[in-house]
Image (cartoon, rainbow, N blue to C red):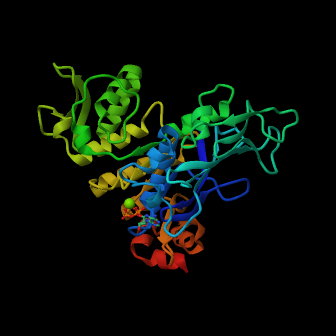
């Protein structure tokens, strides 16, 4: 499974220049399996998660459509106020735990009233080379440039390249080249970014009764919860039973969960609650129960997403349930390299209490209104206090934490 080692975002709203994790050879510590973002209102947490969504939308729909999504409102609202440089993204990632890291970057600008991709590149160190600077295998400026096929890079002796000319500057090169089997690295990158999952779970959507029909993955709002359950049941029956039992144990008051098909072919999730003889269906379940069910189901996915972003999971969850969820997520974050990477924003100290300083990032705005981001593990004082046994969330909640950390 691919893994994001680091990310740099420039000129995207309040993210004037923000780097996270490892953004190149020898530059920083790779991102862990779980990264949690805390900080005051307006410090840029949602913007960071939306940066992932924006990149994925650029790939799927082109940059103009990505800029014009209702929540974004067009290129001029997205570029950091007062800046004239393009919006830039840089990803440093690995295709698998054993492959050489790749740097992907692209820049979006609006030179003539329509947003376009002004630069795009992919770089990798040549096979067998452990050090030194990486070389490009894709380099495009305003839709024109070169691509190196297979596993080659520009610096390789005898490597051949092809000229590329895109007829639509509003599309990323990887959208087109990611369809061609002679460019396996680009095919992989395209599939990777397309499969990022950003959850905007709406309990009311999950309460709807979808037409029966198996679907592999949850959609953003959770509307197809029942269909995903059906898929799991059909393709992984043993695992399905274990998962439902496990989830039922985690949600207080729930004894068993199962599903059935209604007479008109809709899918019903059946929750048996303690103290009641008859089951309840998803329409009657509480927001928090459905939310917890959805998160646990995401974590149990037999074909997991490589990257998941979740905004404020604490909303609507009782603190005990939230602690349980934090424990689940933390455990998930500790189980090796080949796992889903989670990016979570939160305001909940209960949640942060369960985490390690390597997993928590503090976002703040500086005097100019630009987001600054720091890993709590990089503060010696925070580390020392954690060693004394003070949980991270408590440090944060008591304010103590931000003052010491800034100093
Ligand atoms: N084009 C822009 N240039 C600079 N800053 C911008 C731009 N557009 C929006 N902002 C600022 O970006 C900030 C980011 O807000 P964001 O929603 O990411 O905060 P948040 O940390 O998620 O806050 P909350 O905790 O309230 O959810 C806002 O304060 C807004 O003023
Ligand atoms: Mg927010």
- Can you give x and y, in whole percent of width and height, for residue 178 in the image? 60, 32
- Can you give x and y, in whole percent of width and height, for residue 330 in the image? 47, 51
Residue 354 seen from this side: no
- Count numbered badges in the picture: 0
Direction from residue 219 to residue 338 in the image, left or right: right
Q: Is residue 55 above or below residue 312?
A: above
Direction from residue 109 to residue 27 in the image, left or right: right
Direction from residue 184 to residue 350 in the image, left or right: left
- Can you give x and y, in whole percent of width and height, for residue 81 in the image? 49, 67
Q: Is residue 346 above or below residue 266?
A: below
Return the residue nearer the eye: 10 or 268. Answer: 10
Residue 188 seen from this side: yes
Return the residue nearer the eye: 64 or 17. Answer: 64
Residue found 65% across the figure and 55% down from its top: 22
Considering the image in quadrants, where does the C terminus appear?
Answer: bottom right
In the picture, residue 254 is in which quadrant? top left
Residue found 80% across the figure and 37% down from its top: 127
Considering the image in quadrants, where does the N terminus appear?
Answer: top right
Residue found 53% across the figure and 75% down from its top: 405
Quadrant observed for ligand 2 in the rendered image = bottom left
Q: Is residue 148 above or below residue 87?
A: above
Return the residue nearer the eye: 153 or 92. Answer: 153
- Can you give x and y, in whole percent of width and height, for residue 307 in the image? 50, 43
Residue farthest to the right, as pictured: 157
In the picture, residue 3 is in which quadrant? top right
Residue found 31% across the figure and 34% down from its top: 225
């Amino acid at each position: 499974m691919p893994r994001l080692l680091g990310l740099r975002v420039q000129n995207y709203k309040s993210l004037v220049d923000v780097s996270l994790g490892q953004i190149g050879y020898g530059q920083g510590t790779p991102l862990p399996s779980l990264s949690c973002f805390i900080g005051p209102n307006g410090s840029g947490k949602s913007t960071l998660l939306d940066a992932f969504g924006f990149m994925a939308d650029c790939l799927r729909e082109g940059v103009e459509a990505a800029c014009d999504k209702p929540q974004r409102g067009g290129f001029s609202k997205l570029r950091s106020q007062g800046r004239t440089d393009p919006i830039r993204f840089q990803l440093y990632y690995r295709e698998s735990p054993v492959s050489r890291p790749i740097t992907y970057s692209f820049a979006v600008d609006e030179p003539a009233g329509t947003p376009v991709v002004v630069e795009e590149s992919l770089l990798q160190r040549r096979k067998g080379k452990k050090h030194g600077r990486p070389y490009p295998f894709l380099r495009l400026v305003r839709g024109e440039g070169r691509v190196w096929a297979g596993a080659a890079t520009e610096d390789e002796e005898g490597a051949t390249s092809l000229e590329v000319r895109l007829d639509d500057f509003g599309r990323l090169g990887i959208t087109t080249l990611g369809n061609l089997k002679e460019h396996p690295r680009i095919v992989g990158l395209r599939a990777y970014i397309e499969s990022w999952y950003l959850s905007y779970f709406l309990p009311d959507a999950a309460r709807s009764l979808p037409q029966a029909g198996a679907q592999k993955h949850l959609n953003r709002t959770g509307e197809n919860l029942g269909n995903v359950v059906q898929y799991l049941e059909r393709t992984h029956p043993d695992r399905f039973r274990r998962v439902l039992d496990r989830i039922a144990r985690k949600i207080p008051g729930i004894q068993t969960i199962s599903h059935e098909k209604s007479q008109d072919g809709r899918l019903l999730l059946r929750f048996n609650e303690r103290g009641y003889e008859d089951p309840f269906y998803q329409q009657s379940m509480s927001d928090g129960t459905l939310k917890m069910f959805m998160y646990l189901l995401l974590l149990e996915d037999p074909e997991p997403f490589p990257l998941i972003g979740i905004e404020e999971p604490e909303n609507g969850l009782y603190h005990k349930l939230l602690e349980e969820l934090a424990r689940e997520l933390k455990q998930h974050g500790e189980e090796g390299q080949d796992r889903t990477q989670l990016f979570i924003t939160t305001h909940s100290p209960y949640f942060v209490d369960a985490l390690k300083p390597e997993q928590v990032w503090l976002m703040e705005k500086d005097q100019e209104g630009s987001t600054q981001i720091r890993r709590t593990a990089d503060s010696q004082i925070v580390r020392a206090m954690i060693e004394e046994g003070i949980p991270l969330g408590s440090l944060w909640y008591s304010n103590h934490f931000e003052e010491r950390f800034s100093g």
